[in-house]
Image: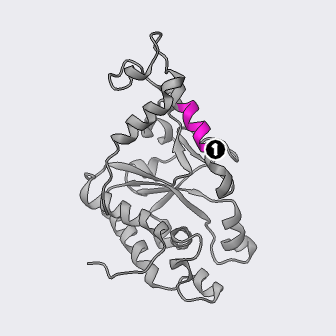
């Protein structure tokens, strides 16, 4: 049993990943954690393998069973060696792809328990265990692990395709200030759903016009119906 650790709620993505690995996934399964400001663009209709096979071969064969994105933003200026920080890899924890195997399970367990150990950036801040509650919380730990050769051996990196542009398939991170990012997400998701919806699916058909396209006046009702089907797993 893990010891009780006082932490900011942002750390719960790690607890959720561990729950998935232990209770939901089978060996070799692939899953993805997304922050609230990251989402899928379904318009290209590609599978994980089709979209990322060329980019992440070691991820798909399980050799490096964790895939993440470099941050390259404010966090870079805070932590990176180019700016006097301790880390050579500035990782963004808003997108974490993982394959279930022994390597990934051990990696996330070590990362969770690392909350009890002062990191190089904790020491630089001059506050023991600053990132238990200080921004960017578990993202700091992921950057520490990625900057440690033994841990980085389990990680591969999803390549950005330009700032504020979607990645080769479906991942988009809206990098605006917290107070104004939600309208961008809502508009992007609505456009994505509207263009990719399949009106021949029985649960979707009631929200479509006779011409087989989504009825814009029923969009909100569609979203409510989809959210009603979401299964919440207590962790």
The residue pinned by badge 1 equals 183
Residue 47 screen position, x and y as percent: 43, 35
- Determine the residue located farthest toward the right in the rendered image: 83
Residue 55 screen position, x and y as percent: 53, 45
In the rendered view, tell whether residue 218 sits above or below residue 15. Answer: above
- Quarter-wise, where is residue 23 in the image? bottom left
Q: Residue at x 55, y 37 (%)?
A: 189
Magenta stretch: give its range: 185-192
- Determine the residue located farthest toward the top in the rendered image: 211
Residue toward you, 133 or 17: 133
In the rendered view, tell whether residue 68 sits above or below residue 41. Answer: below
Left or right, residue 35 beside residue 162: left
Q: Residue at x 65, y 85 (%)?
A: 124
Residue toward you, 220 or 122: 220
Residue 27 screen position, x and y as percent: 26, 53
Residue toward you, 88 or 140: 140
Q: Residue at x 43, y 39 (%)?
A: 49
Tally the marks. Answer: 1
Q: Is residue 87 on the magenta stretch?
A: no
Residue 174 visible? The answer is: no
Q: How is the image coloured?
A: one colour
- Quarter-wise, where is residue 6 in the image? bottom left
Task: Indicate the quadrant containing the N terminus: top left, top right, bottom left or bottom right.
Answer: bottom left
- Magenta stretch mostly in which secondary structure? helix
Residue 71 visible? The answer is: yes
Q: Is residue 190 on the magenta stretch?
A: yes
Task: Indicate the quadrant containing the C terminus: top left, top right, bottom left or bottom right.
Answer: bottom left
Residue 66 screen position, x and y as percent: 44, 58
Q: Residue at x 47, y 72 (%)?
A: 150
Q: Residues within 10 Å of mark 1 (few under 14, many from 20)?
A: few
């Amino acid at each position: 049993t893990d010891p009780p650790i006082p932490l900011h709620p942002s750390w719960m993505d790690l607890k959720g990943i561990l729950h998935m690995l232990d209770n939901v996934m089978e060996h070799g399964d692939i899953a993805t954690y997304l922050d609230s400001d990251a989402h899928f663009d379904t318009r290209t209709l590609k599978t994980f393998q089709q979209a990322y096979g060329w980019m992440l071969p070691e991820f798909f064969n399980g050799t490096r069973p964790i895939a993440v994105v470099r941050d390259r933003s404010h966090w870079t200026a805070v932590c990176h060696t180019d700016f006097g920080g301790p880390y050579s890899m500035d990782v963004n924890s808003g997108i974490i792809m993982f394959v279930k195997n022994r390597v990934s399970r051990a990696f996330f367990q070590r990362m969770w328990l690392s909350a009890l150990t002062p990191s190089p950036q904790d020491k630089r801040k001059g506050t023991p265990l600053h990132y238990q509650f200080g921004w960017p919380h578990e993202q700091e730990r992921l950057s520490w692990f990625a900057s440690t050769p033994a841990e980085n051996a389990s990680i591969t990196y999803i390549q950005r395709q330009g700032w504020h542009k979607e990645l080769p398939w479906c991942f988009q991170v809206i990098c605006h200030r917290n107070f104004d990012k939600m309208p961008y997400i809502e508009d992007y998701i609505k456009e994505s759903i509207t263009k990719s919806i399949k009106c021949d699916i029985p649960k979707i058909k009631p929200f479509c016009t006779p011409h087989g396209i989504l009825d814009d006046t029923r969009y909100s009702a569609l979203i409510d119906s989809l959210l009603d089907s979401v299964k919440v797993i207590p962790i």
